[in-house]
């Protein structure tokens, strides 16, 4: 047999599928579709349901329907409320679709003689009318009307139009491809699980996705792919947990009760109940005989640092070194200073290793680390350079872990021999989800703030009220307070937004607060420059800091008590909460002022209300999740996890639990996936995750 015969049909490049060719292939590539496998995963945006299609003369008021007709007029109206009216006609009559938002955008989409499908609720207002309907531009009448009950409607953009890839064309391509390769689509789930849950087989599931025979089948398609996706996610967790952690011997740590007592008694404050509980959990890990692998979650200001410090101290007492890695120099410096404050310096040898040190200084510190002379090392990415070797690393602490890739985390851990690991985050994950997201970590939560903090007062104001806001800030600044002004920077229009931020800064400095010192900080600035400005702000040399969203997480400037967030409607809830966490870090009353235009969407209004109602990060995370759905909530960037295309981590809890049980059972029975029956699982696992997610070496 030739190598060709082994080739997986799913890897066939789209160009070689019937009906594609080089021009269309190039257009497909703009949508990330390179192979037949990618094409199979090209999910219809939605399905047109034939049972809901009505002729205009059959419509009942307030009914949810789809109408298919020809555009007979497009009219922009600027008198009164600005709007766009698109009139369509079918054999039964006329209907108007109206858009009040994005009039310019929609007026470019519609033109006369187009065939369109409009779906939505129909009202009667001097004739049949749909407000903001869903719409599809159809290419062929026949196609729309005569094929099956449910017609998939695929996403399409400019590139597709240029290459004449209509919805109909896509369906033709699928139909040919299924005829040729349909039988060859390999299964990815073990037989016993398909049987157990009566899942659709993979080939059938794809066929139904693109040529559904009923709405029930579409439901089954979703169920099959959700389970598959979650099964492999949990398999990743199970393998990581099994191979990275369990079998390894942990470094033995004896805890000297008296010393711990002494140390906590020497702190300038008493530990909160939550801090004590979390410390108990950590201590239990340290003596268990396996390496600790724990995530410490706690809202900004909840006091994670001292917990980390106590953990490191216990390791040092046992003759090990401890390291704390922070994402930026300013944070590392801050940690270094507060740790040096809390630990009696004559008893502990502490070092700070950051990139901006002079070479000579760096190599001196590196030497002290490799000889074991440094006991506690605080630093940045500079710590994971090859040159840095530890004599006897016992505990690794990683602060703001989402800022580091999984790889970087691993690189630091590998500086030791299975050290105990504590990763910390201020991004609260709803409890219901942390098991899935951090399936390979144990989770501790600090859910209590140190006593005596005044809750931040949060107000929502519209742009029209800005002058009042300015007056308020002026009064506070003249009393010695400091303030942040944050402007959103959206990636697509970074340049424009940056311009807006610079203009705002100039305006604020010249026209609004000429008597105060303002500074601007944004993402295009060099790291060193940013840090210099931040340091000046911390030192009180700057009264008001205008910034894009780059204010570093965790920066402690207790005198900054006002946070103004411009265009707050553009931020997600968790982001707003993170930004708000920059203030309220001292004993003074702090304020967060959210500024939005007068007219914002309903979900944005919801976000503003939640922000004004609560300071509880977990509640906010839960609301955020509820409003946004888990797809957006867990961007891969935040959590280093594979994308989920089908499953929703909130609504699919039952499937998650089943998949988790099955995946963990499979790994427990066959940790290296060597069983012949697991070969397809192993293969798919490898192709799915490649090495992006730091695989344990299995098989
Ligand atoms: P984060 O969890 O955001 O890292 P930090 O560890 O920086 O929070 O703590 C925030 C501030 O609270 C620090 O100034 C710290 O000294 C103080 N702090 C921590 N724990 C307590 C406590 N139990 N009582 C009073 N203040 C505390
Ligand atoms: Mg912190």
Image (cartoon, rainbow, N blue to C red):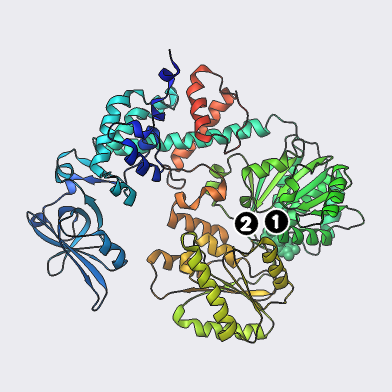
Instruction: Give the residue displayed 53% in from the left and 60% down from the top.
Output: 574
Instruction: Give the residue displayed 72% in from the left and 41% down from the top.
Output: 413
Task: Check the picture and name the quadrant holding the N terminus.
Answer: top left
- As drawn, which residue projects farthest toward the right? 346
Residue 342, position as x, y percentages in the image = 82, 60
Determine whether the beta carbon of the residue marked 2 sits less than 8 angstroms from the nearest atom of ligand 1: yes
Instruction: Give the residue displayed 26% in from the left and 30% down from the top.
Output: 176
The residue pinned by badge 2 equals: 426
Q: Spatial distance from mark 2 to mark 1, Cα to Cα?
A: 9 Å
Closer to the camera in the image, 183 or 676:
183
- Count neighbours of disc 2 (C-alpha within 10 A) and say few if under 14, some if 14 to 19, many if 20 or more: many
Residue 273, position as x, y percentages in the image = 70, 57
Q: Is residue 590 visible?
A: no
The mark found on residue 393 in the picture is none
In the image, residue 401 above or below residue 679: below
Is mark 2 in CB contact (under 8 Å) with mark 1? yes
Residue 522, position as x, y percentages in the image = 60, 66
Task: Check the picture and name the quadrant holding the C terminus.
Answer: top right
Residue 363 left/right relative to 355? right
Residue 141 left/right relative to 654? left
Determine the image quadrant of residue 692: top right
Local SS, label 1: helix
The mark found on residue 304 in the picture is 1
In the image, residue 123 above or below residue 187: below
Q: Which image quarter has ligand 2?
A: bottom right
Determine whether the beta carbon of the residue marked 1 sits less than 8 angstroms from the nearest atom of ligand 1: yes
Instruction: Give the residue displayed 45% in from the left and 49% down from the top.
Output: 631
Determine the image quadrant of residue 358: bottom right
């Amino acid at each position: 047999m030739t190598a060709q015969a082994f080739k997986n049909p799913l890897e066939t490049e789209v160009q070689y599928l019937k009906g594609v060719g080089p021009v269309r292939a190039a257009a497909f590539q703009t949508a990330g579709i390179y192979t037949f496998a990618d094409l199979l995963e090209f999910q219809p945006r939605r399905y047109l349901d034939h049972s809901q299609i009505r002729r205009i003369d059959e419509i009942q008021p307030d009914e949810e329907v789809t109408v298919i007709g020809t555009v007979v007029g497009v009219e922009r109206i600027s008198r009164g409320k600005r709007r766009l009216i698109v009139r369509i006609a079918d054999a039964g009559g006329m209907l108007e679709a109206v858009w009040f938002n994005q009039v310019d955008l929609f007026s470019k989409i519609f033109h006369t003689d187009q065939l369109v499908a409009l779906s939505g609720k129909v009202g009667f207002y001097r004739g049949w009318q749909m407000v903001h309907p869903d719409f599809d531009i159809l290419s062929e009448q026949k196609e729309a009307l005569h094929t099956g009950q449910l017609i998939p409607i695929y996403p399409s953009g400019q590139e597709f139009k240029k290459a004449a890839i209509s919805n109909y064309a896509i369906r033709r391509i699928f139909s040919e491809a299924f005829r040729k390769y349909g039988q060859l689509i390999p299964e990815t789930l073990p037989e016993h699980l398909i049987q157990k849950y009566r899942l659709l087989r993979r080939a059938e599931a794809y066929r139904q996705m693109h040529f559904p025979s009923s709405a029930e089948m579409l439901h089954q398609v979703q169920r099959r792919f959700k389970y598959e996706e979650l099964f492999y996610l949990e398999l990743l967790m199970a393998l990581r947990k099994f191979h990275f952690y369990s079998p390894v011997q942990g470094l033995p740590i004896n805890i000297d009760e008296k010393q711990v007592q002494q140390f906590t008694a020497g702190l300038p404050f008493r530990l909160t109940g939550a801090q004590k509980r979390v410390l108990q959990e950590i201590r239990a890990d340290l003596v268990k005989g396996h390496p600790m692998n724990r995530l410490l979650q706690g809202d900004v200001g909840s006091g994670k640092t001292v917990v980390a410090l106590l953990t490191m101290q216990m390791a040092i007492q046992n003759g090990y070194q401890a390291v704390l890695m922070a994402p930026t120099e300013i944070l590392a410096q801050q940690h270094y200073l507060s740790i040096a404050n809390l630990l009696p310096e004559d008893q502990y040898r502490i070092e700070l290793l950051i990139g901006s040190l002079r070479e000579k200084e760096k190599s001196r510190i590196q030497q002290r680390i490799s000889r074991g002379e440094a006991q506690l090392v605080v630093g940045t990415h500079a710590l994971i350079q090859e040159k840095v070797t530890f004599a006897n690393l016992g505990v690794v602490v990683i602060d703001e872990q989402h800022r580091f890739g999984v790889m970087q985390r691993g690189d630091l851990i590998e500086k030791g021999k299975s050290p105990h690991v504590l990763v910390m985050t201020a991004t609260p994950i709803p409890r219901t989800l942390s098991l899935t997201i951090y399936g390979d970590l144990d989770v501790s939560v600090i859910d209590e703030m140190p006593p005596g903090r005044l809750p931040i007062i949060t107000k929502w104001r519209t742009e029209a009220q800005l002058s009042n806001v300015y007056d308020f800030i002026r009064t506070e600044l003249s009393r010695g307070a400091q303030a942040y002004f944050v402007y959103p920077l959206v990636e697509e229009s970074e340049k424009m937004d940056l311009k807006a931020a610079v203009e705002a800064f100039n305006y604020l400095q010249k026209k609004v607060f000429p008597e105060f010192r303002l500074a601007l900080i944004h993402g295009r600035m060099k790291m060193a420059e940013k840090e210099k400005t931040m340091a000046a702000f911390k030192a009180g040399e700057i009264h008001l800091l205008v910034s894009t969203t780059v204010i570093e997480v965790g920066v402690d400037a207790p005198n900054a008590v006002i946070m103004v967030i411009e265009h707050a409607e553009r931020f997600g809830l968790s982001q707003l909460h993170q930004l708000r966490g920059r203030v309220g870090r001292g004993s003074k009353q702090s304020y967060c002022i959210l500024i939005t235009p007068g007219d914002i969407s309903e979900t944005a209004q919801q976000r503003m209300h939640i922000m004004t109602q609560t300071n509880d990060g977990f509640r906010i995370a839960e609301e955020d999740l509820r409003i946004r759905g888990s797809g957006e909530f867990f961007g891969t960037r935040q959590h280093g996890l594979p994308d989920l295309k089908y499953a929703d981590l909130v609504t699919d809890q039952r499937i998650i639990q089943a998949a988790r049980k099955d995946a963990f059972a499979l790994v427990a029975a066959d940790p290296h996936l060597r069983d012949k029956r697991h070969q397809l699982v192993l293969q798919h696992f490898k192709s799915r995750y490649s090495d992006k997610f730091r695989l344990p070496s299995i098989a």
